[in-house]
Image: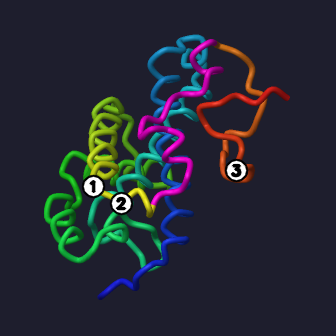
Amino acid sequence: MTRRSRSQEELRNASDSLIYEYWMLKGTTHLLLHHDDITEIGLLRNALLESFLIHARALVDFFFVGKFNREDDAIAGDYFDEREKDSWETHHADPDWFKDARARINKGVAHISYERRKDVWDYMLIEREISNTLDEFVKRVSVDLLSARWETTKHNIELPPFLMKGGILKTSFYPLPNPDWYPDKQGDD
């Protein structure tokens, strides 16, 4: 089935959601790695890991061609002309490194299942592969199709200062409602 073309405005708006998903992936990775005070509490560790996994799944579904994409899902291929899209899709089929993880997310996070497993998650592998793919995407996509927030990041999404300094969260995690607020800047309120 052929996907319908998206307007420049639709693509720019979807690119804001892409920033948010990646920001959440990087933030939860950082917390899982560097904040033992949080991860020692089982409930918080599980909440962080499940958040990481849901955001990872959203990013994989965006970047990689697979049977999971629906017509109203934004995908990386929407940002390219036909030639570039074919090249992207040829090199970005549903990745082997994520197939088992997707099944585990579906069975162990998104659904109550008889097949829920309690293995260790290699979230660093998942984060690294997604980060590499994001870097490649940003290099290949026309900047005209990305929102102004992409220029602000200089294609490098930084973690918010409260994660790096251990401060108090003063604003929403979700950056989209206020165009002046950006995920790598902490509000003064």
Q: Is residue 124 above or below residue 2?
A: above
The image's colour scheme reads: rainbow
Q: Residue visible at 52% across and 23% down?
A: 31
**Residue position marked by numbered label 1 in the rendering:** 140
Q: Residue visible at 60% across and 18% down?
A: 38
69, 132: nearer the viewer = 132
Q: Earlier in the sequence, mark 3 or mark 1?
A: 1
Q: Earlier in the sequence, mark 2 or mark 3?
A: 2
Q: Is residue 188 above or below residue 64?
A: above
At label 3, the amino acid type is: Pro
Spatial separation of the CA atoms under disc 2 and disc 1: 7 Å
Q: Residues within 10 Å of mark 2 (few under 14, many from 20)?
A: few
Say which element carries label 2.
loop
Picture quadrant of residue 132: top left
At label 2, the amino acid type is: Ser
Say which element carries label 3.
loop
Spatial separation of the CA atoms under disc 3 and disc 1: 25 Å
Residue 163 covered by magenta stretch: yes
**Residue position marked by numbered label 2 in the rendering:** 142
Front of the two marks 2 and 3: 2
Answer left or right for 41 relative to 64: right
Point out the residue furthest to the right here: 189
Quarter of the picture holding the N terminus? bottom left
At label 1, the amino acid type is: Arg
Quarter of the picture holding the C terminus? top right
Q: Residue visible at 50% across and 38% down?
A: 153
**Residue position marked by numbered label 3 in the rendering:** 179
Range covered by the magenta-colored residues: 146-165
Point out the residue furthest to the bottom here: 1
